[in-house]
Image (cartoon, helix red, strand yellow):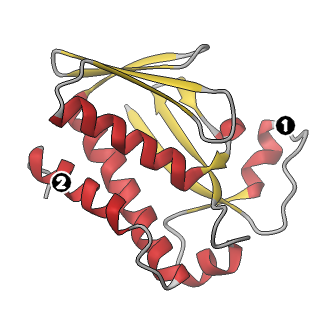
Amino acid sequence: MLQINILLKKKGVKIKNKGLSQLESCFISISEPIEEIRKNLESDFYIEGAISIKQGNTELIGLKEWGLIDQTLSYFLSALCEITFEKQSEVEFLFPDQPLKINLKSKEGYIILMTEKNKITVSLMPFVSEITEQSLLFFEKLNLSLNTQRYNEEIMMIKKLRDFYQLN
């Protein structure tokens, strides 16, 4: 089963040299109320967090790959748009603040997601549904929390993908 979770780094928390069990306490879920998100934003420019993508027991990326989560999600969405609208069969990108490469391959109704260490294959529709749903929640909550329209481009990209795949 596919699981995608988007988390924000808690304000004031130092992550350096923490084990996985300690890392979990460093983040909050994007599903938390706006007040909790607003309280935990360290900056209105550097939005730190993590995205966890798991298929069954295999984790593609998780808390250890934390960083600039708004930019990372934007890169994922752009890659999906390239696969969907530009008919690219393979797209890759680097995380914005670390040398982690993500490769997405489209193949007969599936998406193959790869890093140097891990690989998962997921059905296209559940992946698009889950990542766009979670990303939409994330960007809408950031816009509200920061009292801005800064993430409207990402929101429009998500809505375009959801419309194309008839997920609305």
- Does residue 140 appear left or right of residue 168 in this picture? right
Task: Name above or below for residue 13 compared with residue 68.
Answer: below
| Residue 113 coordinates in the image, percent (x, y) | 42, 22
- Kindly state the secondary structure of the residue where label 2 is placed: helix
| Residue 76 coordinates in the image, percent (x, y) | 41, 40
Question: How would you rate the neighbour count of disc 1 (Cα within 10 Å): few for under 14, some for 14-19, many for 20 or more?
Answer: few
Q: Quadrant of the N terminus?
A: top left
Question: Sequence-wise, which precedes: disc 2 or disc 1?
Answer: 1
**Residue drawn 39% across and 64% down?**
137
Q: 158 or 166, which lies in front?
A: 158
The residue mark sitting in front, 2 or 1, is 2
Task: Name above or below for residue 65 compared with residue 87.
Answer: below
- Residue 160's label in the rendered image is 2
**Residue drawn 77% across and 37% down?**
20
* Figure label count: 2
Q: 7 or 90, which lies in front?
A: 90
Q: Quadrant of residue 81?
A: top left
Q: Quadrant of residue 41?
A: bottom right
**Residue drawn 30% across and 36% down?**
80
Report the residue marked by disc 1. Answer: 19
**Residue drawn 54% across and 19% down?**
115
Q: CA distance from mark 2 to mark 1?
A: 39 Å
- Residue 120's label in the rendered image is none
